[in-house]
Image (cartoon, coloured by chain):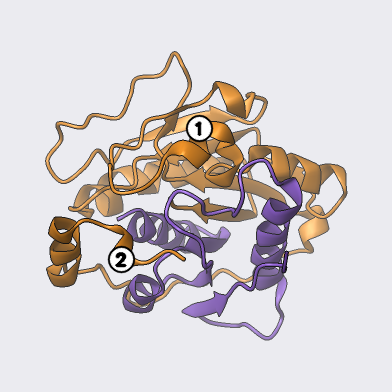
Amino acid sequence: MGDASEFSLTIRLFLKTYQWRKIDPVPWTPLKKPLSQSKLALVSSAGFVLPDQPHFDESIKGGDSSFREIPSGVDVKTLLETHRSESFDHAGLHKDPNIGFPLDRVRELAAAGRIGAVNHRHLSCMGSITAPGRLIHNTAPPAVRLLVEDQVDVAILVPV
Amino acid sequence: MCNQTVCLVAAEMERQGISTVVIQLLRHVAEKIHPPRALFVPFKHGYSLDTPGDANRQRAVLEAALQLLEDPSLTAGPVLRDYLPPKG
């Protein structure tokens, strides 16, 4: 089970005093049409990049809040997992990136008609952002607008 | 921090008209952050969709996420639902 006990004492102490960003008010978009007619996009915070994309910058204080676009047609096995945290076991993601970026699975859902379509692109970010102000105000809004322009209806977001 | 990051991105998506569900690995974090729709999964960090190489178990997590999206009884957030993995 995912639990803070997985982490080192240093990280546990950090998490104990960390001021989590409460979402208030909680925005809510109801499902506008059946999932079988909806276009889906994925967001993963595992730090996946394409081989020719710049890696996330580990030197940025508070975390790199930039996004990478991941095309839907990519072979997930070619993605590079660059998450900087040493606090979790990366072996599973290396063996099967679908457990952090389930692109093969959502393609299957579309093929089966459970969802209408898979968007032609998805978003990847680096999850270990301790100072999320830049994410909230500067980088997430334009990244999300890309998916709005694509007429994405629903999204599944996967942390690691 | 990954749990918080996806919650904050989900909030922006909902503000811009995209319905979302976030997978969460730390229940107490989801309870503090209040993402609109969250599915708490009982897996260790790095294994958010259950077992590497097991498409059926991965699909089961996604199916639970989709059911959260289409549940007509849910009309406002935050919603936090526990995922029960298939036995075996």
Q: CA distance from mark 2 to mark 1?
A: 22 Å
Q: Is residue B74 above or below residue B57?
A: below
The one nearer the camera, A126 or A97, is: A97
Q: Give me the chain letter of mark 2.
A: A
Residue bearing mark 1? A94
Residue at 35% from the left image edge and 37% from the top image edge: A83
As drawn, is B50 to the left or to the right of A33? left
Query: Residue at the front extreme?
Result: B88
Q: In the image, A110: left or right of B64?
A: right
Q: Which residue is mark 2?
A: A4
Question: Foreground residue, A76 or A124?
Answer: A76
In the rendered image of this protein, which colour is used for chain B? purple
Q: Nearer the viewer, residue B60 or B31?
A: B60
- How many C-alpha atoms fall within 10 Å of the one at disc 2: few (<14), some, or many (≥20)? some
Chain A tint as drawn = orange
The residue type indicated by label 1 comes to His
Which badge, 2 or 1, is on the more N-terminal residue? 2
Contact between marks 2 and 1 (CB within 8 A): the answer is no
Residue appearing at x 30%, y 30% in the figure: A56
* Amino acid on which disc 2 is placed: Ala
Visible residue check, residue A114:
yes
Q: Residue at x 40, y 44 (%)?
A: A89
